[in-house]
Image: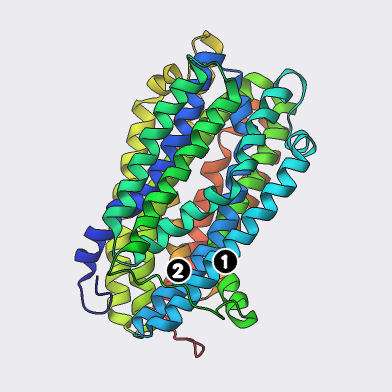
């Protein structure tokens, strides 16, 4: 894959299936956990998954911090035809993530119960949630390295292998979910184990690329310097804040919803959380396909081709937004049935919530790609500001204001208001900054 000379359409054709497939595989794995748990163990288990979701999000936040910064700089230096420096940032990224995963495993296993209690688990859902979380903490290193290798393998010209790993991950997770939770009866811990083993298999599949002759992902000694770590983390902050904001926001939503509506409403929010992850898989997939193309062309100071890439990215995001909106509006009843919400009041609440949430999907994709546009230019303040407004600040403010006035019905309108206001701000910024500037430290 030639980032400097290939057309943006041909590169999108190669990168987009892998990027969206990778995001959807993670979504399918999480969704399979939720559906199988609710089928075998009842809809109350949706609360277990919802409470543990911030753990997934925190790992994704840390991994995104490291890989988005490292991979962006990797692509920038490929754009400058400096492969050795690109490989040094790759090495720095892998070493940092391995060390971080080891720390997360140790801390998580030592303090599982206090962490889960702080996330809102109590009463009869406490024990199954603790069991689920302990398995997650035990697999922090492979969960983290899976995402690192998946992104770098895609950037290094092997998107088909990256895509294959995501498909296999989803299939393995589904099969093991049914086996562990069904016939073996391992409960919540079995569902978590199925997911973790699936990600481990996918990580090993991506590692096959490291044995190929055309492998450009070479580990180089002496790469872990203070200057590289600082720049890598600084560049990765905007995209990691997306994940961190979702983690913090989900935790605050869980706590507020329990106080306003109780376990039944939290079950419905668990479904909304899963649907939001599916939608974001589409939006992030398009933006992640844009990322290496934009980064390389920014490194090459090719403003014209940056504009071409953004126009094509906007078009793809609009298609994704309209598709997700239509699917959730017309498929709300099917989704409620899928999550075993048979009781009349619960099903009615879920259908109404899904359709209201669907309205926010008409704004989210554009906000996402504008964040990536600023991130590849290392304009951290703009990218981080849009991310925080979209994923944390405005949703949480809307939640507390609307629930204070409308109680439970106010919960489901939060995302629409937050995404709509963010879209106005992000488009105003983008219209002012359509001609990117080149930073001297590239």
Query: Can you say which quadrant of the picture contains the N terminus?
Result: bottom left
Task: Decide if residue 373 is on the left or right side of residue 404.
Answer: left
Q: Residue at x 34, y 81 (%)?
A: 79
Q: Quadrant of residue 326?
A: top left
Task: Decide if residue 201 is on the left or right side of residue 265.
Answer: left
Residue labelled with disc 1: 95
Q: Residue at x 62, y 54 (%)?
A: 101
Residue 80 vs 344, above or below: the answer is below
Res 361 visible? no
Res 350 visible? yes
Q: Quadrant of residue 116?
A: top right
Task: Name the spot of residue 156 as percent of width and height, x first.
Answer: 33, 67
Task: Name the spot of residue 85 as percent of width and height, x first.
Answer: 45, 82
Task: Name the spot of residue 4 as percent of width and height, x first.
Answer: 26, 79
Residue labelled with disc 2: 71
In terms of secondary structure, where does tag 2 sit? helix
Residue 344 vs 84, above or below: the answer is above
The nearer-to-camera label among 1 and 2 is 1
Circle 2 Cα neighbour tier, 10 Å, few/some/many (<14 / 14–19 / ≥20):
many
- What's the coloring here? rainbow
Q: Residue at x 34, y 53 (%)?
A: 162
- The Cα atoms of the two marked residues, 1 and 2, are separated by 14 Å
Circle 1 Cα neighbour tier, 10 Å, few/some/many (<14 / 14–19 / ≥20):
some
Q: Residue furthest bottom?
A: 440
Q: Say which of 41 and 306 sits in front.
A: 41
Q: Say which of 371 and 92 sits in front.
A: 92
Task: Name the spot of residue 221 as percent of width and height, x first.
Answer: 53, 79
């Amino acid at each position: 894959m030639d980032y400097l000379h290939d057309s943006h359409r041909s590169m999108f054709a190669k990168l987009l299936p892998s990027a969206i497939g990778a995001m959807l595989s993670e979504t399918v794995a999480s969704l399979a956990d939720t559906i199988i748990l609710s089928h075998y163990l009842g809809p109350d288990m949706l609360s277990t998954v919802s409470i543990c979701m911030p753990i997934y999000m925190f790992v994704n936040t840390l991994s995104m911090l490291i890989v988005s910064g490292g991979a962006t700089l990797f692509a920038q230096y490929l754009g400058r035809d400096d492969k050795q420096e690109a490989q040094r940032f790759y090495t720095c990224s892998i070493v940092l993530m391995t060390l971080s995963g080891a720390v997360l495993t140790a801390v998580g296993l030592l303090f599982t119960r206090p962490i889960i209690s702080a996330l809102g688990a109590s009463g009869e859902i406490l024990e199954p949630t603790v069991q689920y979380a302990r398995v997650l903490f035990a697999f922090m290193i492979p969960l983290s390295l899976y995402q690192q290798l998946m992104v770098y393998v895609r950037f290094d010209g092997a998107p088909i292998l990256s895509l294959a790993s995501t498909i296999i991950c989803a299939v393995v997770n589904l099969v093991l979910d049914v086996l562990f939770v069904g016939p073996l009866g391992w409960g919540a811990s079995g569902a978590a184990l199925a997911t973790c083993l699936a990600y481990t298999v996918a990580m090993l599949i991506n590692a096959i690329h490291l044995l190929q002759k055309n492998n450009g992902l070479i580990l180089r000694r002496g790469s872990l310097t203070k200057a590289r770590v600082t720049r890598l983390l600084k560049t990765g902050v905007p995209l990691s804040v997306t994940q961190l904001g979702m983690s913090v926001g989900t935790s605050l939503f869980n706590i507020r919803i329990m106080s306003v509506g109780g376990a039944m409403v939290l079950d419905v929010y668990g479904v909304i959380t899963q649907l939001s992850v599916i939608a974001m898989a589409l939006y992030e997939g398009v933006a992640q396909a844009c990322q290496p193309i934009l980064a390389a062309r920014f490194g090459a100071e090719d403003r014209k081709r940056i504009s071409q890439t953004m126009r094509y990215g906007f078009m793809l995001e609009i298609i994704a937004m309209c598709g997700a909106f239509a699917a959730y509006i017309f498929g709300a009843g099917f989704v409620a049935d899928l999550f075993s919400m048979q009781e009349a009041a619960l099903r009615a609440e879920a259908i109404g919530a899904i359709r209201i949430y669907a309205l926010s999907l008409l704004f989210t994709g554009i906000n996402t790609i504008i964040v990536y546009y600023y991130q590849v230019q290392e304009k951290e303040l703009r990218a981080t500001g849009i991310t925080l407004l979209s994923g944390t600040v405005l949703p949480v403010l809307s939640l507390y204001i609307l629930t204070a006035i409308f109680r439970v019905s106010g919960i489901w309108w939060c995302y629409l208001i937050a995404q709509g206001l963010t879209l106005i701000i992000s488009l105003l910024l983008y219209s002012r900054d359509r001609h990117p500037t080149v930073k001297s430290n590239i």
